[in-house]
Amino acid sequence: MRHTATHDPVNVEELVGACLDGASLLVEIAGEPGSGRTRLLGELAAAARRGGLLVTHGLQAAPPGRGLLRCLDDLDLAGPATAEPLRRLLAEPPTAPTVVTYSVSTGTMPAWLVSGLAGAGAHFRPHRIPVAPLTPEVFAAQLPPGTGPMREALLYELSGGVPGWLDLLTPLTSRQLRELATSDHAPGSLPVPANCARLREFHGLAPEQIEVARCAAVLGDPFAPALVADIADRATAAVLTVLDELVARDLMRPVDGGAPLFRFRHPLLRTLVYATTPPGRRITAHARAARALARVGAPVPQRAPHLARSAEQGDRGTADALARAARTVLDSWPATAASWLRTALHILPDTADGVLEDSGPAARFRIAALLYHAAERTGQYAECRHLLPVLLDAAENGTAAEAGAEDLLERAVLVDLHARLEDGLGRRRFARSLVDAELAAEPAAIAPSGARLLRLRRATMAAAEGDLPAARSDVAQALGLAGGPSGVLRMDAAATLALAKAAAEGDLPAVRSDVAQALGLAGGSSGVLRVDAAATLALAKAAAPPYPTDAVAHPDATAPPRAGTGSGADDSIEAALRTAESLTDAELAGRLDAAARLGEALGLADRYGDALGLFDRAVGIARRTGRVAALPRLLLGRARARTALGRLSAAQRDAHEAEETAAVLGDAVSADRARLARAWAALWCDGPDDAAALADDVLRRHPGPGPLGESAAGVLGWARLAQGRPDDCLDLVLPVARGTRRPPAPGERVLWWSAAATAAWETGAAAAAREFAALAADGASACRTAGARAEALVARARHTPDEGAVRLLTAAVEASAVAGLAVLECRARLDLAQRLLAAGRLEDAAAEAGRAKEWAERTNARWLRAVAVNTQRRIGACRPRRTAEPQRPGTVAEETLSVREEQILGMVCQGMSNGEVAGALFVSVKTVEAHLTRIFRKTGARSRSSLVAAFAAARPVARA
């Protein structure tokens, strides 16, 4: 059966069966070239041969008297000479049941084919099979195993769900695919495989058809025939005639809407034509296109693609036009802007040689500065490092001042951007050296606004390292600089510093003070800045105590807190969320880092549902505006939120895409962070083996001390624990749990101590388990989140007697349920089921295990479901066995039944299915089937009905 995207599966056996029953059919298979029409035709032919039909291809005569399948592939390309033979074939009654099957494109059907098919008489019953593009799910199944979600999405977007384009796309790297998807024009260097199936569509084209197609490919979709005529240097009427011929071959299609425009049938068809056009011909065509567009008054961004591909060295006018066009699209298409700016920078001369200032070094600086911003947004970090010395030298000799007063061109802005870039890539020492060098200059050499910005950047890095005194010193100096408040930059930097302090687990008064000063200095600043400050303060307050400090440590402290971490945090986060919701997407696009901070603050407050909504919006904005560099952090934040909420498959997909994107950008640190997020989600979804492989890979790359290596050791420790290797778990988690380095997230240390407590208990080290559980409680008291508290309660329950453990685990279940932490709730329920079982409370244990299994099945958490099923089986095995019923006289064979077989026989006699019996006894269906096989053998019954007839009257309900 052949699947299509929007229609039911095509059952070719039914079509063959209809022919075998005496019907004659005219079957049309319509779809885009490459969508699978020929494959479906082949499946129909194979089914016909299996059914005994004769299969022929073409219109040649076939032997009479035998059922026939006639295959006419790509009939719309056969040509007018086919019309008359086709008309005669369909007009005459077949001598035997016949299926005439033809495939055509979904484009405009040629007039000759319409005429030929119109001759079909009443002898053939028409049947149409539409072959639509594949759905993303079906398309993904055709890709090589291990294809990541980013690459999968790019392949689907570029192909439009048409699998016939994969032979052109799959040889490309992920970076090439992204460039192809984001480029303003088809790349001329696209490698085209010699066996590319789509190349065959150009065989037999006349020279004038090839020339028109090439000129149209240069213009891009959609294109006007008059412009094609200008580029091809032909009369418009002649071009229209050729376009009609190309439409008849389904290479081009008219654009709906009334305008005299055309487009290629598929964007990749245009890419293929462009890539196979000789490079010299492309340059000439682009130059003519630029002149033609200028004559009709087209805006600069419309002319820029052609100017960039035809400009001559030293053409300052073209360089200026490209720079202006790039500035226009910088906020929406930064990758396109970067491409134009690179060309502009390349064609500018190195010196001004007497020309006006706007065409000299100042113009070069302005183009380079804009290119830096475009490259930073698209994650071209190597290019940023290459440009920075040029920009700093230009700012040193006064060229920057000549370029204009635009904020994007200020030296301090560029240094701050670069320091942030290097810090994000794990090169904090180099980032700090950049800022230190700038601040070491003479006071007169740097404006107060620039000094304030850089001091706050240095304060942020100091706070991230735990050096709060140095951070406070820089903040104080920054806020004390003359010149009054600077608005956006001042507010942003102050909020960033407060965020770093909040991440340091404490010093909440200082955080509140800094944010208050920042808000006061901002005055009437935009809502964007206020959401940044509110997010920062909310993140800090997330570390504030929501309950007494001894609540976790005390074994009777089982009252669950409400969602969130206290009214202060809730108020702050609510204000931040209201402000964020009031912003337009355009406003938020410039502050995606603030959105990420607010999302992280929501996570620290256990408000993952709100965090997910914010990350969804921010990811969408980043995609639409081409801000690829922001995607790894946003996708990682969304993956963590989805993991906490139990949406494990989606979380793995987000983390995998974050890893792929970071790898394409050359950001290995962010890629490994995302890989760890994948491992943590995989642990609960797919099991410890998959998680261990991912975490171990990261740990091998980061074996020494450091946040990433320690996080990898913690995740791998949990995986080893789930694999039944508690000693290995202790070897991994104890060094990082006992370390003095601050973990990346405050709750991580609680997870490490919880794993250590469980592992120690499983190795028989009860005293160590108590110690580690107490340390987990201390950590939960420090970070003040409901999730950490629940984790600490689970750890403490390990070494607590059964009834006390039941109280602790019940509190953990309630706390995690209120906070929406679905994975933690499921884990706690499974532990609770086991402790209830140990306490002899079988019905309560079965209820908790059933709830955990129901959640795992609903979310496709396969490994947690397996744990739940095993727990249910242990509960079922502990249920009291029913005493055998009095035997019927004369049933000697039945007397050999075991107690379990008696139990199953009673359930079957009451009409229960095997699945229902398995569910009632908490065993697998295969186990029930095995018991029934022995029951049939012992009783001599030949069927289920005979078994019930013989024994039902004598047996009451035997439910467990």
Image (spheres, rainbow, N blue to C red):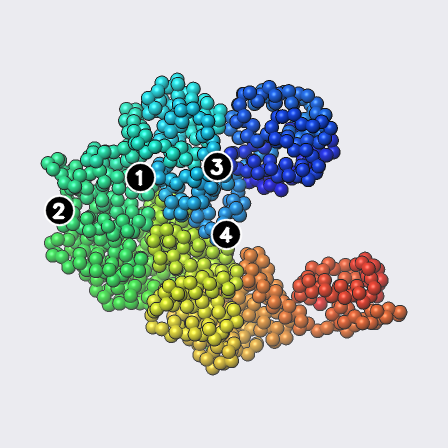
Q: Quick one: SS at disc 3?
A: helix
Query: Badge 2: few (under 14), some or many (20 or more) residues near its Cα, within 10 Å?
Result: few
Residue 788 shows in the view = no
Query: Badge 1: few (under 14), some or many (20 or more) residues near its Cα, within 10 Å?
Result: some
Q: Earlier in the sequence, mark 3 or mark 2?
A: 3
Which percent across, then down, holds residue 594? 34, 53
Query: How much space separates mark 1 and mark 4, taking CA atoms?
Result: 37 Å
Which percent across, then down, holds residue 366? 20, 42
Query: How much space separates mark 3 and mark 2, taking CA atoms?
Result: 57 Å
Quadrant in the picture for the N terminus: top right
Q: Nearer the viewer, mark 1 or mark 4?
A: 4
Q: Label 1 is placed on what type of residue?
A: Val
What residue is pinned by disc 1?
329
What residue is pinned by disc 2?
398
What residue is pinned by disc 4?
145
Q: Nearer the viewer, mark 4 or mark 3?
A: 3
Q: Label 3 is placed on what type of residue?
A: Ala
Q: Quick one: SS at disc 2?
A: loop
Residue 660 shows in the view = yes
Q: Earlier in the sequence, mark 1 or mark 2?
A: 1
Q: Label 4 is placed on what type of residue?
A: Pro
Query: How much space separates mark 1 and mark 2, taking CA atoms?
Result: 28 Å
Q: Earlier in the sequence, mark 1 or mark 4?
A: 4
Q: Nearer the viewer, mark 2 or mark 4?
A: 4
Q: Earlier in the sequence, mark 3 or mark 1?
A: 3
Query: How much space separates mark 2 and mark 4, taking CA atoms?
Result: 56 Å
Query: Badge 3: few (under 14), some or many (20 or more) residues near its Cα, within 10 Å?
Result: some
